[in-house]
Amino acid sequence: MFNVDKIREDFPILKRTVHGKPLVYFDNAATSQTPQIVIDTIVDYYSNYNSNIHRGVHTLSQEATDKYEEARIKIQKHFNAKEAYEIILTSGTTHSINMVASGFASLLNKGDEIIVSALEHHSNIVPWQMLCEKTGAILKVIPMTDEGSLDMKTYHNLLNDKTKLVFSNHVSNALGTVNPIEEIIAAAHKVGAAVLIDGAQATPHIKPDVQALNVDFYVASAHKLCGPTGVGLLYGKQEWLEKLPPYQGGGEMIATVSFEKTTYAGLPHKFEAGTPNICGGIAFGAAIDYMNSVGFDAIANYENELLEYGTSELLKIDGLKIYGTSAEKTAVISFNVNDIHPYDIGAILDKLGIAVRTGHHCAQPIMDFYKIPGTIRASFSFYNTKEEIDILVQGVKRATMMLS
Ligand SMILES: *Cc1c(COP(=O)(O)O)cnc(C)c1O
């Protein structure tokens, strides 16, 4: 049975106040809060077995290595990767995307085509533009529709035998739209293109099965699913990870080194140069255990309730418009009230203890599409409540009155 009061007990930060008011944290799409069990894992690492991995014969190093590799296996199981070495631990989604983009530089030719969705985070646009500049490949964009979904008809028309790569997020961070990635992946494979899915925004709500999806690359960040910042994953199918050259040179990623020739280590070490975020990786594993103990079905059901409630309550406010109204979406509500600048409402909400995001949410092309400077984004998590949504609605009403 899902019990939100009990769950809130797991998150010490939810007890704090902001400007004398109880914290209402609705910026979960930017980063999620951290449960005590993950905080304890971090403290335990630094208190008891902090050590470098893979090198030492000594006990601490062996303990750290074991825990780090256990975390990799937890992540493998969670995403249902075939092999643990298909999970590369990175510093996060941005790092993972850049690793793939940089690897493809050696696989693309002038005139090859890359398709990217119009609903992307900047971190999923810039690396492909850089890759195109480097290789002479051409970037094509899947347009979006008014309700914030992808125009799939145009996508199918963009695909051809020059298409080498397709990139889309699983869920849009600005609007919450859940994209039809099964269809995107299957159609890309028909023309022989590889697919990278950015799961940063999906993984807090959905448990993806990379084998069932048959996706070539899937990336995510721990800090959006109750883990620490600075760690994330690159899942890659073995055949693709073997095809891509290493991203960085350094320790851990080599088998033998001489000044004449260096041979690279096998997977996953080929992509893990230098000392990784050891504590972060272990805490990522603990966060995944925690999320699974709550249960992704329970999370999705409850967050959906919050989304429906929040949508209907906010729409009662005069002049409030919601952006992103696709039938399939996660618990993200992006909105504006009349012509009031989103920042002004956000600043007043902060004085009331309510944390929302305002601005373009690293997705400026979407804001350009709607011809707005940005939105106020309230993003809900399974530890939020309807009472908190009531506080948000009251806050938005109050801010609107003050600013009109
Ligand atoms: C947050 C986010 C990113 C960037 O994640 P980092 O952890 O900052 O690297 C990329 N894509 C989407 C969809 C996101 O929501």
Image: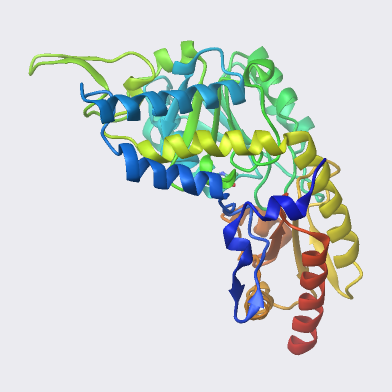
Q: Nearer the viewer, residue 303 or 166?
A: 303
Q: Which image quarter is the N terminus in?
A: top right
Q: Residue furthest left?
A: 259
Residue 116 percent location from the top left of the image: 60, 36
Residue drawn at point x = 63 percent, y = 43 percent: 201
Count of numbered labels shown in the rendering = 0
Query: Quick check: 200 left or right of 153?
Result: left
Residue 77 percent location from the top left of the image: 58, 21
Q: Compared with residue 365, is residue 291 higher up or lower down, i.e. above or below?
A: above
Q: Nearer the viewer, residue 106 or 344?
A: 344
Q: Compared with residue 382, is residue 399 higher up or lower down, i.e. above or below?
A: below
Residue 108 percent location from the top left of the image: 43, 22
Residue drawn at point x = 69 percent, y = 77 percent: 345
Asked whether residue 136 is in view, the answer is: no
Residue drawn at point x = 56 percent, y = 39 percent: 287
Residue drawn at point x = 61 percent, y = 38 percent: 290
Q: Which image quarter is the C terminus in?
A: bottom right
Q: Give the quadrant of residue 252.
A: top left
Asked whether residue 282 is in view, the answer is: yes
Q: Nearer the viewer, residue 215 or 384?
A: 384
Q: Give the quadrant of residue 298.
A: top right
Colour theme:
rainbow
Q: Compared with residue 155, is residue 361 higher up or lower down, i.e. above or below?
A: below
